């Protein structure tokens, strides 16, 4: 798969739906106690390592970044979509947001105390995930926590419409936690916990906590 092609399609798709997506997702955490608990645990892990900047990679409209900030985390957001970043900056003007790609993170080595990718890996094809995880390890401080959330399954499907009925052209990849955990270990992470969300739903979610090895 051509990297430039799927990245461009992902960027264009989310630029197109940014405003409607933000309208739908704004306030969603209030209805998801398990996700809030997950983010609280992640914040506690960051604080336990001494704190520092935390990257929310694939932040979208910035609602998770803002929630972490409310938990006392020095969180900033990165997203591939300039339109998403515009919405995030408008909704949360006191926080830092920047355009960037997890496939080539423009962050210095060992510069963040924690990193999360909350349902933003779902558009990364399998052959690109190991390189993304190596970038995550590179920018994390030794011992820094990593939090991942993603759809569980064994298939990929093309999403052609969404969020207000706008056209999209992105593949949504569902993966088994053990497969993601194996990629993490290969990239130099220790996987510390796995949790399934809505395990009997049609599209369950998974949460993985990992830590960069020294």
Image (tube, rainbow, N blue to C red):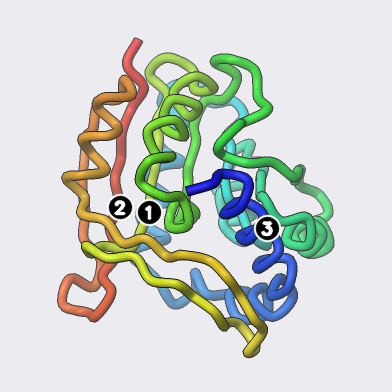
Up-down: is 116 above or below 160?
A: above
Work out whether mark 3 precedes mark 2 in sequence or the reverse, and give the earlier one.
3
Residue 2: image x %, image y %?
54, 46
Mark 1 — residue? 149
Quarter of the image for residue 210 reads: top left
Query: Which residue is drawn at the image coordinates 78% and 62% (left, top)?
Result: 83
Work out whether mark 2 precedes mark 1 in sequence or the reverse, and give the earlier one.
1
Mark 3 — residue? 11
Residue 4 horizontal side relative to residue 39, left or right: right
Residue 205 horizontal side relative to residue 140, left or right: left
Mark 2 — residue? 207
Q: Residue furthest top?
A: 214
Q: Residue furthest front?
A: 2
Query: Which residue is drawn at the image coordinates 74% and 75% (left, top)?
Result: 19
Say how many tags the image has.
3
The one nearer the camera, 152 or 59, is 152
Element type at mark 1: strand
Up-down: is 149 above or below 171?
A: above
Q: Does residue 45 appear anywhere in the picture?
A: no
Work out whether mark 3 precedes mark 1 in sequence or the reverse, and give the earlier one.
3
Q: Are marks 2 and 1 in contact (CB under 8 Å)?
A: yes
Query: Which residue is drawn at the image coordinates 46% and 41% (left, top)?
Result: 43
Give the Cα separation between the discs numbered 3 and 2. 25 Å
Give the Cα separation between the discs numbered 3 and 1. 20 Å
Element type at mark 2: strand
Give the Cα separation between the discs numbered 2 and 1. 5 Å
- How many residues crowd around disc 3 within 10 Å: few (fewer than 14), some, or many (20 or more)? many
- How many residues crowd around disc 1 within 10 Å: few (fewer than 14), some, or many (20 or more)? many
Q: Are marks 3 and 2 in contact (CB under 8 Å)?
A: no
């Amino acid at each position: 798969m051509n990297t430039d092609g799927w990245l461009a399609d992902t960027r264009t798709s989310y630029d197109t739906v940014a405003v409607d997506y933000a309208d739908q997702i704004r306030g969603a955490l209030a209805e998801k106690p398990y996700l809030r608990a997950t983010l609280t645990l992640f914040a506690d892990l960051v604080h336990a390592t001494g704190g520092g900047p935390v990257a929310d990679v694939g932040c979208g409209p910035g609602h998770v970044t803002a929630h972490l900030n409310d938990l006392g985390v020095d969180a900033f957001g990165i997203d591939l979509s300039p339109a998403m970043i515009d919405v995030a900056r408008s909704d949360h003007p006191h926080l830092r947001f920047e355009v960037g790609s997890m496939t080539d993170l423009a962050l210095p080595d060992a510069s963040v105390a924690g990193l999360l990718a909350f349902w933003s890996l779902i558009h990364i094809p399998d052959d690109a995930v190991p390189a993304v995880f190596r970038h995550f390890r590179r920018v994390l401080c030794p011992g820094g926590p990593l939090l991942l959330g993603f759809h569980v399954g064994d298939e990929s499907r093309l999403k052609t419409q969404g969020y207000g009925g706008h056209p999209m052209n992105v593949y949504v990849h569902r993966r088994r936690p053990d497969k993601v955990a194996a990629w993490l270990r290969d990239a130099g992470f220790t996987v510390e916990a796995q949790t399934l969300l809505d395990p009997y739903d049609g599209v369950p979610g998974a949460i993985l906590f990992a830590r960069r090895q020294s």
